[in-house]
Image (tube, rainbow, N blue to C red):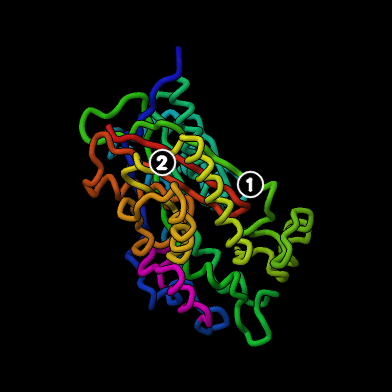
Amino acid sequence: MGLRDVFITGAGEFLPGSPVPNARIEDVIGRVNGRSSWIGARALRWNGVQTRHYAFDSAGRATHSNASMCAEAVRAAVGDAGLQARDLTYLAAATTQGDLLVPGHAAQVQADLGVGPLEIASFQSVCGSAVMAAKAAWLNVRAGEHQTAAACAGEFSSRWFRPSFYEGTALIDGKGRLRPEADYLRFTLSDGAGAVIMEPRPRPEGPSLKVDWMEVVSLAHQFPPCMWAGGAPDAPDARQGWSLAGPVAGHAAGSVALLQDFDLLKRIIRAWIGVYLQRVDEGRIRPAEVDHLLCHYSARSIRREIVSLLEATDGMIPEERWFSVLSEVGNVGSASIWVMLSRLLRSGRVKPGDRLLCIVPESGRALVGFMMLEAV
């Protein structure tokens, strides 16, 4: 049997709780050393987020797990496809960090779904892990290994931001303030999950998206970690991670928290653009033929940087074709691309024949993923 066409026949999302406005962020995730953040207002100006969702309530109790949010997103996606969870035979699950160190995230999601037996695969990176999982699902259906596959991605970022991750560690300066490379992320990342269903034929009614191609490009050979957890705050080294030092010593050194190198990020943005422009030069991406651009970015300021770099090139896609939900749901990490896609499909804007380009840059260690889709 030759390779088959593959279609996204359903998309779904799950965002926990009610939207949390900017003024209530620290009421939910807590105040480090009991003090309001000194950088929070500035971070919100940079990222442009107005509301987000957390899997914690105001009393500090978790309302969901990462796996349970992913399971809800898969249920929404199979429902959108006119199927049931028991119809799945393959599940690929992506995340930045699962609920447990072991076992893999996909096993936890399957257990919450309560279906099986089925084949599973877990993908752990940062935002780009969503494309890794999607490509695995696509190739399995394309090769005829499976008829109905789900690719999901979820994040429970807010648990990284509880005050106990920072208090009493080297991340607190002499004035009792949290270092900005840790504090900024507390006002940017959000909780939630998204999922898509892939089948070898379009659904009988409603829009389906034919998958033309997918690609994941890592530039880890060129850059050190830009977003990381588990390594020293100033110089992450896998040989000196938190596990080798021991969890207590690692926590005291600030190695357990999630951190971002903002100076390095500025260089990585240019590297992402370079990979994109290569695909334009090769003719794989034709900007004039893209009707909808779903580009994941963590902050409004990064979008402005991307636009400024592209406007002087033949690779610029007019901003009126861009679709984003960052301001209303925040940066949901690996889940962001599926939340965007789900909402775009529900908006009624996508017409048969439209071409959708999904771009998912990842700052973890410089990675970018692409998906080209066509509405049928």
Horizontally, residue 287 falls left or right of residue 320, namely right
Q: Residues within 10 Å of mark 1 (few under 14, many from 20)?
A: some
The part of the image, by quadrant, that contains residue 229 is bottom right
Q: Which residue is mark 2?
A: 113
Q: Nearer the viewer, residue 20 or 340?
A: 340
| Residue 74 image label | none
Residue 75 shows in the view? no
Q: Which residues are magenta?
A: 37-60
Q: Amino acid at mark 2?
A: Leu
Distance from disc 2 to disc 1, alpha carbons, whole Å, reads: 35 Å
For residue 250, above or below residue 125: below
Q: Nearer the viewer, residue 311 or 103?
A: 311
Q: Which residue is mark 1?
A: 219
Residue 14 shows in the view? yes
Q: Of helix, strand and loop, which one carries label 2? A: helix
Q: Of helix, strand and loop, which one carries label 1? A: loop
